[in-house]
């Protein structure tokens, strides 16, 4: 709960800060964000970034670094490479943290230099907001609450420079959309934050979604990030998975080797019962894990295995194949010690049911014992396991 609370504050801070930086007229000659030549040079690099072709992306971004060594853009983009290396398994994967922080610190350093030179430079606050936001989020994932709070505070410091608001590029509109949506959604879903929200200007959820949709259509650097947030907003915050599905499908089709987009698409297909398409998508995840493809690991494997098990049990009535995939889901979960996850517990539950149906009561009890060990008493599988334990004891008494 504490982590989720803090992440919400970080998102709000990013959005509010970015939203606030609609600054007076600036000289567009010095702006790389809207420089079409730079965007053309970056296109393949950005596509490679989101498709997990990190070496190729880094080569493109280093070209910008060589030509603009004192601009925050290349350091921020190189930092995003490290971020996406971390993202598929953000809780466990710490090997890229140091490099990520170094690059984001470099982006901040050069953005602050720009800002000190010209407070009306629109790029400086954009990069400061983004870099501090990503830093704060990773620190919160690492339970470094003081450092996360410091990053958020540093972003807020720039709010006082945002009194006059004029032209916005679609890149900066991204922050506007996030702020408008989450400034309303947060107090609606976390009433304890309402007093804090009184310190912020009131947003507009519908406008926020419209702005994010505009970013998707018109922005370059923040296009995919806006799609990522829209996908999450529609599927989680708004409970409209049918609206999230086309976005997830696009991201998967466009970046088929991005494990996060891949498994999110699979999750939506599963939640909507679209098993025919899901079977291929889920099997592709397991094939990429077997091939050692970058970013594909136990979390993705747990999802894919559970989905395939469900397909074989529910659609094909093939409990042997279902058992094989439930066992895979359990193995992936245990490898990352995800003992309390629903996928782990429900995989055990299904295996217990299958074993009991085959009258292999001892095996069934072994599965249910694991549930009793790891599930909370309120979890549905714990209740099921307690019920089976009573039945198992009667069975043992009757059968010696």
Image (cartoon, rainbow, N blue to C red):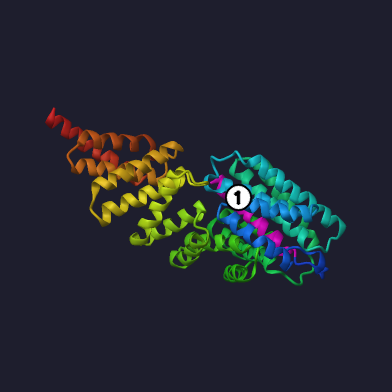
324 horizontally vs 292: left or right = left
Q: Is residue 13 above or below residue 370?
A: below
Between 253 and 399, the one lying in front of the other is 253
Q: Is residue 169 above or below residue 354?
A: below
Which residue does the image show at 62% across and 52% down from the upper left? Answer: 56
Q: Main secondary structure of the magenta part?
A: helix
268 horizontally vs 348: left or right = right
Which residue does the image show at 71% across and 59% down from the upper left? Answer: 17
- The percent coordinates of residue 278 (x first, y second) are 37, 58
- Regarding mark 1 in the picture, which secondary structure is present there? helix
- The percent coordinates of residue 288 (x first, y second) are 45, 48
User: Can see residue 379?
Assistant: yes
**Disc 1: which residue:** 54
Between 36 and 98, the one lying in front of the other is 36
- Quarter of the image with the C terminus is top left
Which residue does the image show at 22% across and 33% down from the upper left? Answer: 362
Q: Callout 1: few (<14), some (14-19), or many (20+) C-alpha neighbours within 10 Å?
A: many
- The percent coordinates of residue 161 (x first, y second) are 80, 61
Q: Which residues are magenta?
A: 1-21
Magenta span has 13? yes
Quarter of the figure with residue 127: bottom right
User: Can see residue 377?
Assistant: no
Quarter of the figure with residue 347: top left
Magenta span has 298? no
85 horizontally vs 316: left or right = right
Q: Is residue 247 above or below residue 110?
A: below
- The percent coordinates of residue 387 (x first, y second) are 25, 41
């Amino acid at each position: 709960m504490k982590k989720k609370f803090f992440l919400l504050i970080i998102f709000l801070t990013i959005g509010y800060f970015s939203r606030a930086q609609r600054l007076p007229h600036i000289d567009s000659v010095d702006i790389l964000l809207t420089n079409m030549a730079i965007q053309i040079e970056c296109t393949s690099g950005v596509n490679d970034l989101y498709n997990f072709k990190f070496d190729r992306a880094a080569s493109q971004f280093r070209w910008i670094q060589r030509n603009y060594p004192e601009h925050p853009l290349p350091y921020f983009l190189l930092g995003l490479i490290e971020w996406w290396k971390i993202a598929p398994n953000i809780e466990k994967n710490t090997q890229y943290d140091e490099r990520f922080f170094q690059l984001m610190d470099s982006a901040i350093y050069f953005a602050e230099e720009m800002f000190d030179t010209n407070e009306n430079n629109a790029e400086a606050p954009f990069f400061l907001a983004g870099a501090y936001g990503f830093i704060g989020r990773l620190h919160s994932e690492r339970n470094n609450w003081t450092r996360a709070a410091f990053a958020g505070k540093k972003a807020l410091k720039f709010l006082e420079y945002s009194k006059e608001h004029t032209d916005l590029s679609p890149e900066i509109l991204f922050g506007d959309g996030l702020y408008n949506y989450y400034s309303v959604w947060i107090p609606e879903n976390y009433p304890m934050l309402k007093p804090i929200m009184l310190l912020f200007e009131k947003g507009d959820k519908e406008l926020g979604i419209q702005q994010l949709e505009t970013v998707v259509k018109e922005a370059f650097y923040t296009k995919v990030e806006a799609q990522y947030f829209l996908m999450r907003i529609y599927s989680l915050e708004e409970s409209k998975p049918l609206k999230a599905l086309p976005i997830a499908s696009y991201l998967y089709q466009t970046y088929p080797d991005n494990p996060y987009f891949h498994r999110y698409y699979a999750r939506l297909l599963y939640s909507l019962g679209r098993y025919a398409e899901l079977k291929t998508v889920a099997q592709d995840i397991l094939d990429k894990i077997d091939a050692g493809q970058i970013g594909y690991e136990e979390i993705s494997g747990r999802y894919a295995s559970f989905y395939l098990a469900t397909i074989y049990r529910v659609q094909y009535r093939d409990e042997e194949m279902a058992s094989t995939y439930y066992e895979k889901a359990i193995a992936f979960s245990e490898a990352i010690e995800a003992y309390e996850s629903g996928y782990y517990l429900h995989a055990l539950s299904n295996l217990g049911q299958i074993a009991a149906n085959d009258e292999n009561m001892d095996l069934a009890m072994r599965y249910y014992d694991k549930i009793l060990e790891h599930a909370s008493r309120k979890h549905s599988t714990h209740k099921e396991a307690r019920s089976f334990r009573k039945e198992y004891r009667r069975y043992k008494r009757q059968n010696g």
